[in-house]
Image (spheres, helix red, strand yellow):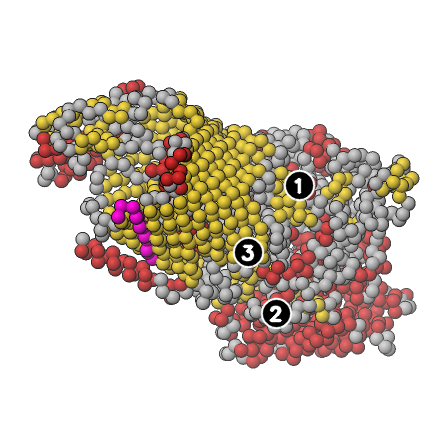
Amino acid sequence: MMFFTLLNNGGNYLRNNYLLKAKMLFLLILVSAFQVSAKTSTVNLWQNTVITGTVVDENGESLPGVSVGIKNTNIGTTTSVNGTYSLNVPTQYSGGTLVFSFIGYATKEVSIGGKTTINVSLTPNQKALDEVVVVGYGTQAKRDITGSIVSVSSKDIEKRQAIDVLDALQGQVSGLQISSESGRPGAASSVRIRGTATLQGGAEPLYIVDGAQGVNIDGINPSDIASIEVLKDGASAAIYGSRSANGVIIITTKKGEEGKPRIAATYLQSFSKLANKLPQANAEQRRLYDFKLGRNSSTNIDSLNPSYNADNDSQDLLARTAVRNQVDLSVSGGSKQINYYGSFGYLKDEGIIINSYANVARARFNMDYKPTNKFTYSNRIQFSYQEENRINEGLTLIQAIGRPPTFRIFFPDGTLAPTLGGRRNPVAQALYRKNEYDIYNANIFNSVNYQFTKSLKFTTDANVKFGYNKNLQFSPKILSNNLLDNNGSDNYTLQTYWQVQSYFNYNKTLAKNHNITGVLGVAADKAFRKDNGFDGTNYLSETVLTLNSAQLLSLGQASESANTSASLFGRVGYSYMGRYLFNSNFRYDGASRFGEDQRWGFFPSASVGWRFSDEKFMNWSKKVLEDAKLRLSYGVTGNDRIGDYSAIQRYVFGQNYYNGISGVAQNSQFGNNTLSWESTQQLDIGTDLSFFKGRLSFVADYYIKTTKDLLYNAPLPSEYGYSSVQVNIGSIRNKGLEFMVNGIPVKNKSFQWDVSYNMSFNTNTIEELYKGIPLLPGAGKWKLEEGEKLGNFFGWKALGVYQYDVSNSYSTDWQRLTPVDVSADGKTAAGFTLNGNPYNGTVQQLSTNGNILKGGDVIWYNPNNDGVIDDGDKVILGNAQPKFIAGILNSFSYKNFGLSFNLYTSWGGKIYNSARLGLNTFNTVNVTPEVDAIVKAWYKQGDVTVWPKAQQNSPVGNIREVNSNYIEDASFIRLRNLKLSYTLPTKLTSKVKLQNVGLYIYGTNIATWTNYKWYDPEIDFNNALQMGEDNGRYPREREFGFGLNVNF
Amino acid sequence: MKRLKTLLVITSVIVAATGCKKFLDQQPKSDLSSELFWRSPDDAKLGITGVYDAIQTTIGTGNYTEWGDARSDNFSFGGTGDNQINVALNGLTAVTPSADWSDLYITIGRANSAIKYIPRIQGIADIQKNDYLAQAYAIRAFMYFYAVRLWGDVPIVLEPFEDLKQQPDISRKPVNTVIDDVILKDLNQAYTLSDKTKINYFEISTGAILAMLADVYMWKKDYPKVIEQTNKLMALNRYGLVAGTDWKKLFTDPGTTSIRENIWTLNWSFLVDQKGNGNNNFQRIGLSGNTSTYEIDSNTLDKFESNKSDIRRRLTYDTLLVGSQLGVDKIGKFYPLGADGRPVYPTRELNEAKIPIYRYADILLLRAEALNKTTPRDAAGAVAIVNQIRTRASAGTVLAANYPTETDVETLILNERQKELFAEGRRWFDLVRTGRVISVMDPIIRRRQISLGQQPTGFTDARKILFPISRDALNRNTSLVQNPPYSE
């Protein structure tokens, strides 16, 4: 502010000195950080009036740093530490207006009118209904929204120490389910809005960043986000027609605010550990296991060999306390004509498994330049670089848990042991195996808009994205079975994307009460991807890992693909006094991925809103119910996320070698040239209620979402010579209810309590499949059939374990008999009873794979009553999807202290714990089962247990995949994060010339209440066909940290 | 501002104009759309290569052993899985991996395309074009021959599938129809078309077609035809038995021109075939650093061990392992010997053992069987062939007088086949063909069950000789009916 005052008032001798101006600008950015509130400029020549005053907040506390300026001029100042200001007002402005503005507070205007003292009190702009939300191609007042849109502000995001955008969103929005794939640093997340509505067509929502599609959201620093809007219903999303069937998430990054440059710096450090360790057999229990297996002589239990007589805790050796360091810096500011926001963030994130890490650097530059009232140029530039070493869980964690504790990990000289008895050394695997990623992303978005008239604006923008992803893998000799071979690979992916959009916005209020809005525009885009890579073997040097070191090279991958789309879109909106609201979106989209005559799809929508609180008959409730609205919307949206060339019958190269020739053959997926859009019709009924002047608000929505012309890879009879065909047939229906309650139960001068609760229920049904053929993905571990839900586990149901051999006795109609007076060897019984009555009929026995089940074998449910347990006896064992998800966010502030925490729950889903099943198969003798499977295993005739006998090479499949013993309840409640913060008193900070200093400590993933037996019940659901299998993912850590925020 | 307005208008016009039809027409970049293939002479070569590649997937990644050996007395279960135990104990179900015929029909599908389109390609010499076609026909027959031996009745598809609206009949057709109307017809067609001068051990040549014909007639028990086909094969004057000193080279170096015994061997290169996975079939029975899926059965080991002068004993497995703690848990037959005379097992990633499909010794022994079965019976001729094989292997000769009956001679030949062709995917089919499955396997399976603490139920149900049809195939093709007694 001082700078502009200077330019304006002392302009005579500066006006022609551009060089000096530039220097001043540079100085401004660098120095103004340390400048105290402006004292009255001494170069002011014609000062006439000095206006002084104090600015306070709604509680009467002084507000430092408030901008005070004369309207429509560049004259201004900011308030001092104690909230006072003093401003020289040139005579010509003495009749003008003073503008007081401060971030987070409503701007206030006071006319000078000859006064020399003007004291004001500012009120926070917390009135949610005045907020503006970003919708496709424009903004809308929050109170006028007719669809189901949830907005998350930067304030909500600051309550947690988010690593990325999705981490910032989890648990904050009803109907939005986010699960990270694992606890690995840099792990991706799966995101579902209102359930999964497709099989393979891609179920992730569409992300729009500052108006552009295709931006890599991993490249966005959460602290750069101004707001996130989640468009859940079909009518809101339909303006993004073709790609919006899974909902739309709109991210808006921060802009500079008019005023002095603000420099913000934050630093945090945290320490993470394995949240919980799995119980693991110790050496004693391992020996018991060997005993139960009947292994009396084997090299592996040689009692004199030190390699096999340790007692290691492999999980401890593999896990560590991981340190995360994060620094974010941002500079922002602006004038009437220009505003800017620049940031740089660096995150160094160690994983809790040794040698795993992700280091991320992210930079951003946002600028808006408005040289005239009509013309604006904006850009959004972001760049990110990420380096990671990803650990293979199967070779480390799973090995660590199954490894006999007796097996040594280190030799006495500290070197790592090689693979012993077929068991890999998890520590050596973690330290020596490389799986390094370098990921670069750049995104440049340019936009110009021109305000033709007050109501008509034209915008055209272009977004260009570039992504490069390099993956180097290497496995040295020490990890090979014979210690002689090494191998590796080097792969890269190059991706480019561009999009151009042009559209008109129209907004006019007629006769005061009729507001008409409109959007009309066109867009086109193209995405390109190229994958290349080589595999290498016999590297000459294990230090040089580029492919020139490998003695044998083979082609890893080589492919290129591209797709294009073109669109016409529009919106019409009408509002009568904000009481009756109507919106209609449409989009007409063409996509290259579909059959030549099937490329274009039309996606219309309409929504209406009724603010019944404005009706006269509601006057009685005004005191309590401030604002109330009913919404109804219906929209059709599309999904085009299939392979780029699924509609073309193709011959493929490079994977059909024989006898030194690279042959060519039909792609095993049959090309379907009739492929077209998958479309989702969604009906949404919702209400927004606001009570007690915004102290309590309630939003609820009910929806029915039906996806038709389902795009998925349907199985073809293999007799046709193809394995599958991408079809456009079938239907899935999602129904759900979701609500959010926000309240401020306590609010007084020094204490405030904010609470927000959200909850979502969703159920889905597969309505139709291609020719009614059920899908059996994952080698039959799931079954998807008409009339059932997605994510049904399909397998055998265990009913217990036979106590005696003779316990496997059944009546002629396959009812289980109870043996009476069983002989000592368990083979015969004096008699049988059936339901308590003596049974004298024929006795039958269950068999499987040609073998009769005996004592210690699992009792299987035999639904087809044929006496043979085989795959005809598989039944649905449960469903992977939760019945509801909910989150509660609480924040308390007391004077300078703040406390916030977030509980998150997912309830009613099941997980197939395949990692645990893999441990317990007894097939590989050196894989140690879980403790119960050893200690409680059936051992002799008469043992009563649910754990089958430990037997290697059992021919009866006691641990068959999938069986109900390994389908576990995935319900959990998690204290997701907790943060205690303290803001230094301004009196103190101002002495060291800082505007604002905050300190905090926080914890993430602090506690989880669950019955789930593996590390973590929160599981991703990326693959709609194969939901809810935990094959031993990288565990999520428990993190505690502290941080510092400084604003200059 | 005026300039700006013009600029904006121009931009929007460009944007709108790009929405045209051409912009949305994106053709594959690293693949070829089907109308652009099967055009040039090179396409014929590449397309045929694609068919061979499908054979590699069908049998080269495990089914060679699973189909031809695993259920026989050659192997018992080893390693660390449920499946091999089920196979070794005759406990197959619809989810047993080897019950899946999908790769087999994908190979047939590729051959069908080749048969349809190669004749249309211009610019190839007829002799070359016909030889490509001969290979495609023979491969198709070879796949159907596997299919009928494993599942009995199978669907017949002879045209490429090219239109989703097509509903070809894919119900199961009787074995005899498949053999007579498809397999024999294709093989005879292949014989007519094949380039009689071509010698290539890794491709199907005239010799391989004749060998297949002999094999098929043997299955049909049409013994005169077997003799006729083997006569034709011998008349090619191209094949013979190698010396005992070269016996190992049949497997480790099959492509050498001096090796005249190999008729058709499936090539394998770890660099390009199923790369990284090293999915060569023989990883199941012997690999460095991994446990074998199947280990030699003790009965068969005893047969080998009973004649220590037989060179095939030490060339088939590492004799130093006999009687050791772990036993003979690996078969080194297909790998070279190291300086110490023991097999050098490759790692999984680097395994590129070649897979023998037909060799002269196999055909000679089939001929011997046929001689023993034809009228007039030529038992002496049969025993002479056996002795020819035994002599080459330094196994000593046998006297025809000691094998008085037809069955005795057949047993002699089958035992010789078992040793000579051990792990070459022959034994199970020999047992099925000669009706010996139950008599040979029932006692062995009982023995295995007892050793595992199970109640011995053995192999008594002859219906279980056929493989089950996979659950996946039943699910996709509702016109299929399961082989009883496997569950529907």
Q: CA distance from mark 2 to mark 1?
A: 41 Å
| In front of the other: A887 or A1010 | A887
Q: CA distance from mark 2 to mark 3?
A: 23 Å
Q: Quadrant of the C terminus of chain A?
A: top left
Q: Is residue A542 left or right of residue A440?
A: right
Disc 2 designates what residue? B167
Q: Was residue A521 drawn as part of the magenta stretch in this picture?
A: yes
Using the rendered view, name the quadrant where residue B93 is placed: bottom right
Query: Is the magenta region chiefly helix, strand or loop?
Result: strand
- Point 34% across, 62% down: residue: B18
Of tags 1 and 3, the one toward the viewer is 3
Residue A391 in picture, x, y percent from top left: 53, 40
Q: Is residue A1017 left or right of residue A308?
A: left
Disc 1 designates what residue? A966
Residue A733 in picture, x, y percent from top left: 54, 51
| Type of amino acid under label 3 | Ser
Using the rendered view, name the quadrant where residue B462 is placed: bottom right
- Point 61% across, 45% down: residue: A879
Residue B91 image label: none
Classify mark 3: helix, strand or loop. Answer: strand
> What range is drawn magenta here?
A511-524
Classify mark 1: helix, strand or loop. Answer: helix
Q: CA distance from mark 1 to mark 3?
A: 30 Å
- Point 25% across, 60% down: residue: B10
Asked if A278 appears above or below B391 in the picture, the reply is above
| Type of amino acid under label 1 | Tyr
